[in-house]
């Protein structure tokens, strides 16, 4: 396994089960609910059940991410590889993404995601129970305009998830990576990626990445 990325300051160029290096982000135990921030489902509430390590991406971080991406994602193909509550992937669908795949390893959370999609009438959203990294490896090359990576902070999934996501990314696409520490240029270059935007909010480092 590659060494853990060295901590770097914020870039001037400018959220299941599993694992990733770095300090544990405080878990939300029975956090209640989160809301979709924008798009056709704006203000829709999504339940947050009590699960070890389940930690929806903070509202401020999600708002910043979709400001970076733009409010209209019409026609985009998106993969939320560690979906959890679905807040990231459903936010993309709310803003017009044509195809959104939500991958979640926890059976109960996957069922909850299906119920949410039914309630919303989210015909462009698919839910797949499984391992996010394995699903990414199965994607056709260049298939995704946006890959959302928010694995558990207390394991070792960051390197394999990035390695699996990079080939699936379209030439003009983006990878969103949420991690407990900043990734420097050398660590990203090993996956053929560069940092486009960075935000630190509390214990969260939010990265928007592109192909080198």
Image (cartoon, helix red, strand yellow):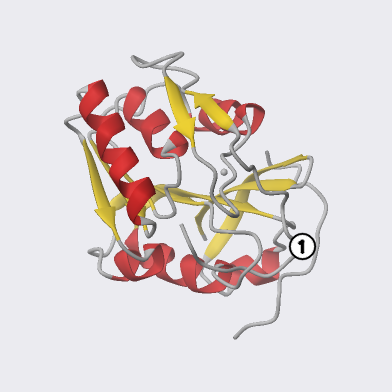
Q: Name the residue at the bottom extreme.
A: 1
**What residue does disc 1 label?**
23
Q: Is residue 159 visible?
A: yes
Q: Which of 172 and 24 is in front in this view?
A: 24
Residue 159 percent location from the top left of the image: 56, 72
Rendered-image quadrant of the N terminus: bottom right
Residue 133 percent location from the top left of the image: 40, 67
Q: Identify the residue at horizontal 46%, vertical 22% (top origin).
A: 36
Q: Identify the residue at horizontal 44%, vertical 27% (top origin).
A: 46
Dot 1 alpha-carbon crowd within 10 angstroms: few under 14, some 14 to 19, many 20 or more: few
Q: Nearer the viewer, residue 45 or 38?
A: 45
Q: How many marks?
A: 1
- Horizontal placement of 177 versus 38: left or right? right
Residue 68 percent location from the top left of the image: 55, 31
Secondary structure under tag 1 reads loop
- The answer to whether residue 152 is above or below residue 199 is below
Residue 2 percent location from the top left of the image: 63, 83
């Amino acid at each position: 396994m590659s060494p853990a990325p060295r901590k770097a300051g914020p870039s001037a160029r400018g959220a299941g089960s599993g694992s990733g290096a770095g300090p544990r982000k405080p878990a939300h135990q029975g956090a209640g609910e989160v809301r979709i921030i924008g798009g056709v489902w704006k203000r829709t509430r999504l339940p947050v059940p009590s699960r070890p390590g389940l930690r929806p991406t903070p509202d401020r971080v999600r708002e910043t991410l979709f400001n970076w991406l733009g409010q209209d994602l019409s026609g985009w193909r998106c993969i939320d590889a560690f979906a959890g509550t679905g807040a990231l992937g459903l936010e993309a669908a709310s803003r017009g993404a044509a195809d959104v795949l939500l991958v979640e390893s926890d059976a109960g959370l996957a069922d909850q995601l299906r119920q949410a999609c039914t309630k919303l009438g989210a015909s462009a959203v698919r839910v797949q129970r499984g391992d996010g990294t394995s699903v990414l490896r199965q994607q056709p090359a260049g298939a995704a305009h946006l890959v959302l990576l928010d694995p558990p902070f207390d394991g070792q999934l960051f390197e394999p998830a990035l390695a699996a996501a990079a080939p699936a990314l379209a030439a003009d696409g983006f990878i969103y990576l949420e991690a407990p520490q900043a990734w420097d240029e050398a660590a990203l270059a090993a996956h053929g990626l560069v940092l486009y935007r960075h935000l630190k909010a509390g214990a969260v480092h939010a990265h928007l990445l592109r192909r080198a």
